[in-house]
Amino acid sequence: MNELGELRPSQLIFTFGIGSLVDLPNMSALVMGLDDWDTRYCKEIEEDRLIAAVQKRLGAQMNRLYMPPIKLDSMDRDPTAPAIGVPVVPFPRWMRCSLCDTLATVESGVFKLIQDPYRPDRTEYVHQGCLKSQGGRSPSALSVRFLLACREGHLTDFSWLSFVHKGNVPCRPATLTMREFGASGDASDIIVECHGGCGMSRRMADAFDRDSYKYACSGHHPHLRLVEHDCKEEAKPILLGASNSWFPIALSALSIPRATDKLGKLVEEQWAKLMNANSLAKLGFYREEQQTYQSLIPLFAEFSDEEIWVAIEEKRAGQQSALPAEDLKLPEWMAFSNPDSSKENRDFKLKRVSPPKGFEAFLEDTVLVERIREVRTLLGFTRIESNADFAEATIIQDGRMTKLCRENPNWLPAAEVRGEGLFLRIREDVLLAWQAKDEVKQLEQEFFESHKAWRRLRKLEPVQDGFPGIRLILLHSLSHALMRQIVLDCGYTASSVRERLYSRNPGEDGGPMAGILLYTAAPDSEGTLGGLVELGDPLTLGRHLQQALESMRLCASDPLCSEHRPDTLGRGIHGACCHACQFAAETSCERGNRYLDRSVLVDTFSARGTAFFE
């Protein structure tokens, strides 16, 4: 096992998580499941509320969150150091010689792995027996760029032998080549030939012709080394690096403090180190360990072991009583909607200011989130189609989620980030009056029909479940409009600003809610620059809100954009919006750019009567 490259912990959750394909300099690799991870070099992350929410989905045995394994600084450039990191394997297993176009598997022995312990980026497969090589360096072997995947999360190599021979394979063993003609890389310019005696050949364009060629799913989960033989889905050919090859299903929670006294806050902040202290004697041992627990000595110097032990027991008792409450957003809403009474610690600090100037009739006081901590964890993933946003990730009935390990997991990979943000809250009386309009009710019905069509197309039952209502559509559209505006002045990139929506109607559990949290959180110093909090000044925020709403009146794609209605064919769930006006980056949007319509904010060319900000 050799080091092949580096990834950030957040990338292992949202971009290159378990079961995804990582494009290395000289090959493609698949990230393996949790069964192959070495947790000895993983740091545990503590977040009670997030663990409780995950247990609702995956079972009570899941009780820990770990950071991905990180290599120690002392091991840099040491070829004898143990292999520490996330395990990967070459995938797809079929490779092609870059010189003679020979197509063969890694296991066939045609290609040889060459590793450089001092230059991990040079690790590659080479074709040593290449007939076209002229005595020099053996040519590199490259991963083929065609795979098979299905909606149930299975992934396997393209069936080259069956494809070339049209289902009947007379050549044993078969010698294949893949030749490309032209520079476009189009499938019609790629020909696969058999040189085992039959001489058959076929263009790759036939592989994407659904009428003439269909694929039965093999039920293969390569990241688990597992084959499920009862898959009824049809496999689809995809390209290596395709955006629909892996969609993460993740959950995140904000750290809301509970302790009020100084000792309780210190125990909460240092809980990752103190949680394993199961006796007073062991706690004393921890305090005596100057090297490993040196940071605990000055923090708890004024407290005795007995006082600290009582605080630890109170923390454990509070955890057990809070575990059944898997509602992630209710405690956050209560803290943001009552900032004066909310508790503070090193990772959470709020400040109330006046509402944006000019919008006092629509919005409550603004809350400046000066410090915030977010923990994100990966639950699973899907392929071909993404059906995961914050609401659907906690739905137990939907089983279309590929597991991260063969058995029910005891732990999950997670990442913690810190940052800042702004919280806006719409006045409930104004919102209820707007929802009662006939035009708004008609638009809500159109979105409901589009929501049912979207779920029906993806075979999600019952189709009417999970509809968030027109309230969320308003909050979501306002959030995107404001995000696009503030990134011009806050100093953060557009993809680093995220949204968190709090939307519940009166009568629902914890309702009513009508709030937006715009925040940035990063593992480095970028998340604490202060740019978002600075924009919370009533005069500044009012100006940005006014400009955001003005920009929503006219889109570069009008009149086509303003005339767009919620689709009834299941292709999408949005109204008057597009990439030019409302869509945000995947890392920023909580709902996958669904449930958006700028006509609920202001009047457009084609909509009248549904604008909230008249």
Image (cartoon, rainbow, N blue to C red):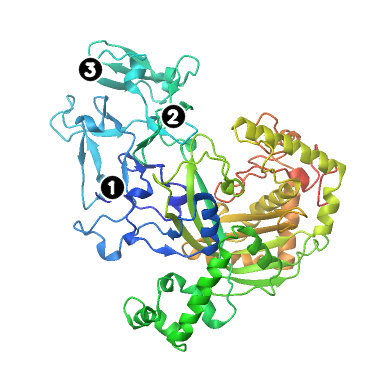
Q: Residue at x 40, y 20 (%)?
A: 204
Between 359 and 249, the one lying in front of the other is 249
- Separation (CA) of disc 1 from disc 3: 36 Å
Secondary structure beneath label 2: loop
Q: In the displayed image of the protein, which residue is found farthest to the left?
A: 135
Does label 2 or label 3 sit earlier along the sequence? Answer: 3
Three-letter residue code for mark 3: Arg
Q: Reading the chain from its start, which is encountered first: label 2 or label 1?
A: 1
Which residue does the numbered mark 2 point to in the structure image? 230
| Mark 2 closeness class: few <14, some 14–19, many ≥20 residues within 10 Å | few
Q: Secondary structure at mark 1?
A: helix
Nearer the viewer's eye, disc 2 or disc 1?
2
Front residue of 399/70: it is: 399
Q: Say above or below: 595 vs 330.
A: above
Sooner in the amino-acid sequence: mark 1 or mark 3 = 1
Percent x, y of residue 246: 47, 40
Residue type at mark 2 is: Asp
Q: Nearer the viewer, mark 1 or mark 3?
A: 3
Q: Where does residue 378 sit, x and y in percent of width and height? A: 48, 51
Q: Which residue is depicted at the point 79% across and 41% down?
A: 604
188 shown above or below 82: above
Residue 328, quarter of picture: bottom right
Give above or below for 457 relative to 366.
above
The residue identified by callout 1 is: 121
Choose between 607 and 412: the one closer to the eye.
412
Residue to which mark 3 is pinned: 172
